[in-house]
Amino acid sequence: ALQAAADRLSEEVLRKRLDYWTFALGPKFSEKERARVPLYRDYSINQVEYCRNFIFQRNAPIHKIFERSCEMGLLNLTADKVTQIFGFRKHKRLRGKFYTMLEKIDHGHHVLRAYAKDAVARMYEKFSTFLRVELCVNRMKDLRLNKGLENLKRLRQILTAATDRFASFEAQALNVPVDFPLFQRLALPVTVGKTKIPGIKIHDTRLLRLMEALLHEGTQIHGWRTAEIHQRITTAFGLAQGAYSLTQLRYDIRKLKAHGLLERQGQRYCYRLTDKGVRVALMFVLFHKRVCGPLANSLFDRRPNQQQQPGSKIEAAYHKADAAIQHILDQLAVAA
């Protein structure tokens, strides 16, 4: 309804209302004065703002996605992209300013701004579920139009196309991975019936061993019984007798079942990971053995020699990560 009302706001409607109010509030002239001077009213557009709202069903994803897209927008919104959005022709004698900036106002809410000549494009959150794309033009000549009210229809067409281009660019920036609090959610306790089951901590060595054992392809075919899982864990990790009992294993299995990571196969007491459990187990195991473990070894134990680096893409990535972390530590030391 609001969009339909805005579309009906044409030049004729505005001129009619402006004529009424200027006659009611403006100065009055006699017939003699009007006969001597050809008086008429002319209306012009000095500043115009045009916006488009994208409405989300819930506010949970919009804030995180928008914050991440702002970071991408600062990198990718170059002068070439900004001129394409506004439809300007870029040349050496172009007046005005071309840059992008990110502001934090109103309790830390982000506002992404892209300036071009005397125009500005903004994108920000509104009312928790609105993502607003907004254009503000302060000089009509930048759009090759004069200030006359008769150019309102053409101005609306130009700004509609500009918001489409801006929204298309931001659609690519919004298609980014954001922070998902997986470890934080799993660490919270869950209630099954009247029993409160503790959460799954990322540093729980027993659960890490159990997840790694359950990732074996044999469990996904017919499942494993508790005794088989216990034997595999003690054998694979070289645990002494009594270091990990069947009672402890049953407790850990119960915890995984309560969090929806483990399931029984039919009526048999054979267990295997659910689809969610496979993804969670991979995250836990890979984080410790392929991400956190190697990087922590370089920081606290021994850093591998860069002169004898193996010809592996994974090892090259580890060396780059080590250098990046060391650079951050150096910058923090300088700032302190």
Image (cartoon, rainbow, N blue to C red):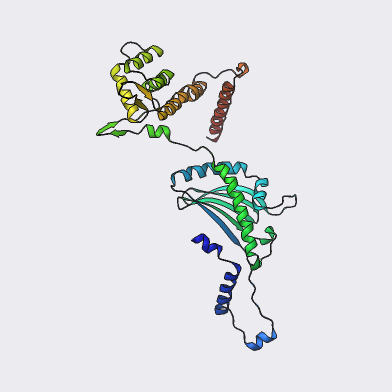
Give the number of marks.
Answer: 0
92 relative to 132 in the view: left or right: right
Residue at coordinates 69% horizontally, 81% vertically from top-left? 38
Task: Give the residue furthest to the left.
Answer: 194
Q: Position of residue 226 (x, y in %)?
A: 32, 18
Q: Is residue 261 above or below residue 57?
A: above
Q: Is residue 221 above or below residue 143?
A: above
Task: Give the residue furthest to the front.
Answer: 266
Task: Give the residue furthest to the right.
Answer: 92
Q: Is residue 83 above or below residue 263?
A: below
Q: Position of residue 32 (x, y in %)?
A: 66, 89
93 relative to 1 in the view: left or right: right
Q: Position of residue 279 (x, y in %)?
A: 44, 28
204 relative to 332 in the view: left or right: left
Q: Position of residue 34 (x, y in %)?
A: 66, 85
Quadrant housing residue 16: bottom right
Residue at coordinates 59% horizontally, 53% vertically from top-left? 163
229 relative to 333 in the view: left or right: left
Residue at coordinates 38% horizontally, 32% vertically from top-left? 186
Front residue (pair 153, 301) = 153
Quadrant housing residue 157: bottom right
Front residue (pair 108, 73) = 73
